[in-house]
Image: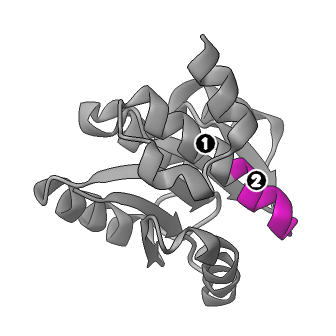
């Protein structure tokens, strides 16, 4: 069983930047990149059919076809994916979109484009640590990549 990170953005240059930023996780997680919500839906089905888990979705807000918020809402409504941690990336969002993303898609983090690479990596580490602990995964094998303060705080409870 493997843990997966899935990044979705319709712009190839953004995906290339995400690929660079997320490379620190490559040794511990399978990372996939999709250019549309439809491609991401198919990938989530494949991952689930193999018995693997999606730990983190990093999704763009504005995409042709289906918005990232609507994709994340659908994903959140699927019982199989309710524990998945979600980051919404956006360059254009209004107040309504933000509220909808938080309330209906249950996103954990909202990051504006262009983002700071260190900040994205730090947030991803925290969310992955939370996912691993909340879903009862064996966290020891992930120790080098986990957020230590989050790990310590969660284990103390």
Q: Are marks 1 and 2 in contact (CB under 8 Å)?
A: no
State which quarter of the image contains the N terminus.
bottom left
Q: Is residue 30 left or right of residue 110?
A: left
From the top left corner, tell me how far across and down residue 42 is, in percent. Answer: 25, 66
- The residue that disc 2 covers is 122
Residue 115 visible (yes or no): no
Q: Is residue 111 above or below residue 156?
A: below
Residue in the image at 60% along x and 42% along y: 127
For disc 1, the neighbor class at 10 Å (few under 14, some 14 to 19, many from 20) is many
Residue 9 image-quadrant placement: bottom right
Which is more toward the observer, 150 or 11? 150
Colouring convention used in this rendered image of the protein: one colour
Secondary structure state at the residue bearing disc 2: helix
Q: Is residue 115 left or right of residue 66?
A: right
Does residue 122 show up magenta in the picture?
yes
Which is more toward the observer, 80 or 40? 80
Residue in the image at 83% along x and 57% along y: 119
Residue in the image at 31% along x and 60% along y: 41
Identify the mark nearer the N-term, 1 or 2.
2
Residue 104 visible (yes or no): yes
From the top left corner, tell me how far across and down residue 80 is, in percent. Answer: 25, 37
Distance of mark 1 from mark 2, alpha carbons? 9 Å
State which quarter of the image contains the C terminus.
top right
- The residue that disc 1 covers is 127
Q: Which residues lie in the magenta part?
A: 113-123
């Amino acid at each position: 069983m493997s843990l997966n990170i899935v990044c979705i953005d319709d712009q190839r240059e953004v995906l290339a930047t995400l690929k660079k930023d997320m490379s620190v996780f490559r040794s511990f997680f399978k990372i996939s990149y999709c250019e549309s919500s439809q491609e991401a839906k198919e990938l989530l089905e494949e991952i689930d059919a193999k018995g693997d888990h999606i730990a983190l979705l990093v999704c763009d807000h504005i995409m042709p076809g289906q918005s990232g918020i609507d994709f994340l809402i659908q994903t959140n409504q699927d019982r199989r994916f309710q524990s998945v941690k979600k980051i919404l990336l956006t360059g254009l969002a209004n107040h309504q979109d933000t509220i909808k993303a938080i309330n209906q898609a249950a996103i954990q983090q909202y990051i504006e484009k262009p983002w700071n690479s260190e900040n994205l990596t730090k947030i991803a580490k925290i969310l992955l640590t939370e996912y691993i602990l909340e879903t009862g995964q064996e966290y020891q094998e992930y120790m080098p990549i986990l957020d230590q303060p989050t790990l310590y705080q969660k284990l103390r409870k």
